[in-house]
Amino acid sequence: MMTLPEEEFAEVAADVGHGRVPSRTRVVAGRFFATGQGRLGFALLALMFLLAFAGPLLYPWSYTEMDFSAFMQPPSPAHWFGTLQTGSDVFAVTMRGAQKSLIVGLLVAVVSTGVAAAVGSVAGYFLGWTDRTLMWVADLLLVLPAFLILAIMSPLLAGGRWLLFVIMLALFLWMVTSKIVRGMTKAIKEREYVKAARFMGVPPAKIIYRHVIPNLASLLVVDATLNVSAAILTETTLSYFGFGIQPPDVSLGGLIADGSRTALYAPWTFWFAAGGLVVTILAVNLVGDSLRDALDPGGRGSA
Amino acid sequence: MTTGTATGTATGTAPVLEVRDLEVRFGDVPVVRGVGYTVEPGEVLGVVGESGAGKSVASLAVMGLLPRHAKVSGSVLLHGRELLGAPEKELAAVRGDTMSMIFQDPLSALTPVYRVGDQLAEAVRVHQRVSRERAAERAVELLDLVGIPNPRQRARAFPHEFSGGMRQRAMIAMAIANDPDVIICDEPTTALDVTIQAQVLEVLKSARRETGAAIVLITHDLGVVAGIADRVLVMYAGRGVEAGTVRDVYHRSRMPYTIGLLGSVPRLDAGRDVPLVPIDGSPPSAAALPPGCPFEPRCPMAIPACARAEPPLAEVAPGHSAACVRSGEIGEPRPVPPEDVPTAAAGAYPGVPPPRPREGRAVVLEVDGLVKHHPLTKGAVFRRRVGTVHAVDGVSFDIREGETLGLVGESGCGKTTALMEILELARPERGRVVVFGRDTAALTPHDRLAVRRHLQVVFQDPLASLDPRMTVHDIVGEPLVTHGYTDTGPRVRRLLRLVGLEPAHAARYPQDFSGGQRQRIAVARALALEPKLIVLDEPVSALDVSIQAGVINLLAGLADRLGLSYLFVAHDLAVVRHIAHRVAVMYLGRIAEIGGADQVYGAPMHPYTQALLSAVPIPDPDKERRRRRILLDGDLPSPADPPSGCRFRTRCPKFKVLTDAQRVRCVEEEPAVRPLEGDHGASCHYAEKLGVV
């Protein structure tokens, strides 16, 4: 077995022995946080999470409690965001709704984009029977009426089984993206760097994870960002029709739907929930944009 | 300021085309910065330079074919008539009539939906008042003139039915259709194989004879220019830096860039022990030119004065001008003072012991009767096989430890297919591939991974073979991670240093590097696991000449120092000459000739090798013009339907001179590679030696 000349290594080792390993994860993270946009988006999202989950712990009112001495009251020291017609505290229900919407929105987006990436790239990379089977499943789900199925399944979803709800929502969001991913994977598979990796002995699963998916990053990040809003809106629609998240539990979508009726003469019933939704989606978009730029080698980030 | 006019030879004839102080800007970026030349009737002016030197843009500006947003200034005189700023109608009357152009890519230059003959006839009828029948007749004559067989029949063919060489001939036919006075050829042979290139250059020469036109030949290939041009203009960073007769420029160069370019070109007549001299760095970008001489940062002879002001292209001898402040010092007989030439990295390494004889060394790769056929199928639902492409049809060779085998051949000969078959490490369709003594047919997945550790690959296009989304660190470290290393940082830094890159660049992405640097990254990745055998698929053909030399030297140096074996696949025989110990020439899926590089290049025995070698131009005008060229007829037959018996017989110059009795053997019996002298073998029934270089 031959070795690279040692004296050359010794000479080199003298001045390169320091510094962290500049792997992709580190470089991308560095570039993400180097932009003001990325930091702002991340901070906003973190703040929303903090408020939604830690806020109710420090607040005297719970979302199930009703103050029978204050119906439809504007914001006051006792009720920070005012109260609803039922006497529910707006801050408490908004935070509870934000918890649900954040989890549902982000999880659905991550799960559906993840499924789309996995299915599309596996189908496009292996082709043959794998491809035909996976695309057949995608086609089947595309022709099924998603709303109807969710409505039929709603009794199952009742009783706080929100995780099942997330999965059901995600199940009907991934198909179109997976088809795009499949097409792009077929093109990437023919690139020489994929061949180079194959001839290096990298197993197929790792090639997909390391070479195919990152090269689809722009598409996937945009898709995930769009899916967050799509999921929150779908959840809202479902809740409006009496499926999805049911009272006494609340979601931002439900609150906005209710608040829109009283928005004109009691703006606090509407604007706090709507503002929460806008801030959340804005933060997700900022994070998505910065992440896409950070992943893109063409961007002039500080590496 | 005399912004370089390459003055013509003092024959007194009026120039056909005179270009003065031509400048082209795209926005704020000056792409062409004062180019001037004159061409006289029947003269060939070679314009050479690397990519980005502005040679194509300058010629498009002369033709008035640049987009509207390009700002062009200066003067272009055709027969004394100013073309710059002339109305479009006037230009259209000139283009294709007195002045015509041949482009690099003949496929996009012909309209795919019209017959070739009709397109030619159209070119005639645009400028001449002749009947439709007469124009069609003229089209057939033109096709005949450029050597297309059965011109009457071929005139009715569509462009896609023509091969690349035939399309380029059709383009030449179109260019000479109206008996032009100037033909501008923009890289007319770059996309073609060498044997086809030789054919096309012959056609170009005969076109000049027929029409008496002046030719402006734009190319990066110094060999082509040496063979055909009368005068040369060397361009660098948008300017002419040296101009003169071809012998003056090649033998008495006065500009360090020209000297560097000539020193870095791989030559067919120089062996592995003659190292190439690369030019440091890479050409400057047009948007960020240095304040002084644009070549100063790369110039081995730079002095402080060079960085201050850009020297004009000034006459240094009658009919010879150069843009260099030291051109006077650069002596007549000796091109460069030896102390100024950077010593090359290849060749002599003092610590390396002389190699053991070939027989004593272990075989790292043995390929025996390798076959790969691609089925040709038809129909979407019920696929049926309608034929077979014999991509690789019984190829055998071996590579020993520390040895470089060059696998050469024209496009379509099956060299890349053979290489991919080897790299798959699977059971081949027929035949045997043995890597490090292990038959690939019997490898378990675990064994295969172990073999891959010692077998690495470098591809042609470094940008395509490096994942654009990975940092250089991750790219070079990938094989290490795959094979179980955990701490890759220090090792990657060492590897980068080994291939001549800054370790600090590991955090960058491939696109931040130039072509040559990217290929160095690919080499570093291939070296990461300390392999025994590296397969190189055209590793330098995507690079500019001055960059190419550095990579070739690096590869040759690494092979000598680290005892690597290479399987070096290339179409460029001159490059292979500089790196290979042994050479295998492929033709239509079979090996035509195999042997030591000195034997194969020095005394080739197969008629195909002889023709191939004779077609490669040598960048030396005297040698190049003395050589005898063996021209091959026609194109490579389709590998789906190879000729019976010897596959080369349809184009073989030897076959033509054989008696009928001798020919029977060529038609009926397929020749196998038979050893003729030591391990030098050729697959020809009537092989005999012939010096062609």
Image (spheres, rainbow, N blue to C red):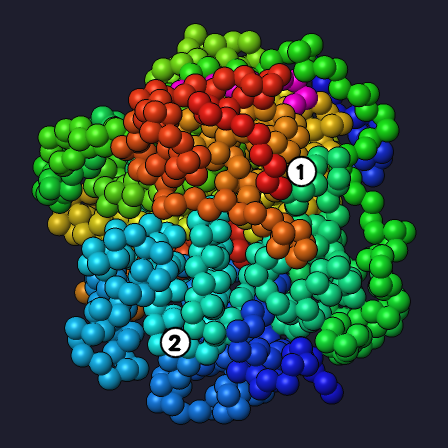
With respect to residue B279, does B58 lie above or below? below
Dot 1 alpha-carbon crowd within 10 angstroms: few under 14, some 14 to 19, many 20 or more: many
Q: Which SS type dominates the magenta stretch?
A: strand
Can residue B611 be spotted in the picture?
yes
B338 sits left or right of A243 in the view:
right
Q: Nearer the viewer, residue A204 or A6?
A: A6
Query: Quadrant of residue B431 in the image?
Result: top left
The residue drawn where x is 38% and y is 90% is: B90
Residue B179's disc is 2
Chain containing the residue with disc 2: B
B363 sits left or right of A229 in the view:
right
Chain containing the residue with disc 1: B
Q: Nearer the viewer, residue B476 or B327?
A: B327
State which quarter of the image contains the N terminus of chain A.
Answer: top right
Tally the numbered discs. Answer: 2
Helix, strand or loop at label 1? It is helix
Residue B517 placement (x, y as % from top left): 65, 47
Query: Quadrant of residue A266 in the image?
Result: bottom left
The residue drawn where x is 43% and y is 44% is: B632
Which residues are drawn in magenta?
A: B394-403
The residue drawn where x is 17% and y is 31% is: B386
Q: Amino acid at mark 1?
A: His
Residue B594 placement (x, y as % from top left): 54, 25
Residue B128 placement (x, y as % from top left): 28, 82
Residue B578's disc is 1
